[in-house]
Image: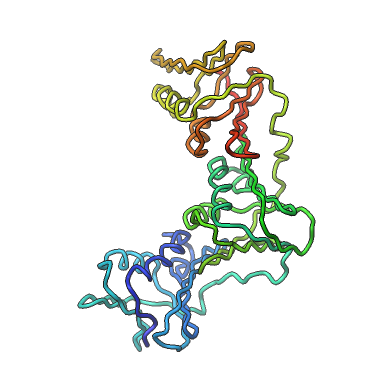
Amino acid sequence: MILLKANRDVLLKPIQQIAGIVERRHTLPILSNILIQKKGTQISFIATDIEIQISAALTNETTTDETSLTVSARKFLDILRALPTNDELTLSIQATNRLVIQQGRTKFSLQTLSADEFPTILAQAEIKKHLKITEQQLKSVINLTAFAMAQQDIRYYLNGMLFVFEPGLMRSVTTDGHRLAYAQCVLASQKEQTSETNEVIIPRKAINELQKILDDTDNEIDIYVGTNQVSFSFRNINIISKLIEGKFPDYQRVVPTKHSKHFIIDRELLAGALQRAAILTTDKFKGVRVILSTDQLRISSTNAEQEEAQEDLAVTYSGEPLDIGFNVQYLIDVLTNIKVTDIKLSLEDQNSSALVSADAIENYRYVVMPMRI
């Protein structure tokens, strides 16, 4: 049975979109496979790790038969990448339940497993909230905050991104306990079951996959929030993710509002100075000193070998001087991920967190705790 006839790139794209969540090693062998389903003229490709599921679909009018099977995701993807770009290929099933990929004189025959064993995640029937957002909007708020997510923290609710849905607004918040990133966007259209505020924590892995797949376009995404899952539907793609249960920290209390020391500086200029100072730091100690005085910002670092880096930057500032330490990587991360010309840095004293914001990005906040040096 012929499943599909298409140019290699047409088939490669949906496989690349879903293959990122497939684990190389898994206790269930079937989870290293992707599910291929053909219903009428539509062929769907589905991958899951039980917590997250991504599906991508193609329309192909080769045949209208219905069938389903699973095949190794890695082998399938590697074969498609290795085939010539512009030539048509044929995807078919042999009587021995082998998946055959043929392009010209090249032919691969892959082992399959029954689709009945594949653990698909069903979308929840009960939807608490349905809203629409553009790909560009969602990608922007994710990019502005994703880098501050915790990694394998025992406080499991930090290993993801908090989304706050309010009438007409969506916020994304992340923290690892040492820093916090907050972004907000206005929704042009919204379909709601209720007008109440909903908060959900989406796992890190699902956020990472969204970052890879989203484009900078005005294509609309439908977001459906259920009791313990969320789904994103756009273009030919559907992503379903289980939610992280737990109480996210009160981010509004963390963001400082009464800092008295402020200055504006070129983002790339500051990032360059920090990256140079970071050369003399170590993996165990990433501390740099930020010394603020009249019209000058000094960045300095030292290490156990008594080596020192120092750089002075001109800023417009006339307040009291301040000498404060930070993890240099936390500052570099935010400067790398906010694509603006100038940033505003607000400080108070040696024991107070710093606030990074930018006039060019409305309602964006990045808070970083100081460190002793």
Q: Nearer the viewer, residue 276 or 6?
A: 6
Q: Quadrant of the N terminus?
A: bottom left
Q: Looking at the image, which residue is at 54% across and 15% down?
A: 291
Compared to residue 85, the image places residue 195 above or below, namely above
Residue 229 image offset from top left, x and y in percent? 65, 62
Which quadrant holds residue 189?
bottom right
Residue 250 image offset from top left, x and y in percent? 73, 40
Question: What colour-coding does the image apply?
Answer: rainbow
Q: Looking at the image, which residue is at 66% across and 23% down?
A: 352
Q: Quadrant of the C terminus?
A: top right
Q: Looking at the image, which residue is at 48% across and 31% down?
A: 332
Compared to residue 254, the image places residue 300 above or below, namely above
Which quadrant holds residue 301?
top left
Q: Looking at the image, which residue is at 59% across and 15% down?
A: 317
Q: Nearer the viewer, residue 44 or 67?
A: 44
Compared to residue 205, the image places residue 295 above or below, namely above
Classify residue 72 as left or right of residue 140. left
Residue 305 image offset from top left, x and y in percent? 38, 15
Classify residue 308 as left or right of residue 153. left
Q: Nearer the viewer, residue 358 or 71?
A: 358
Tell me how many marks there are.
Answer: 0
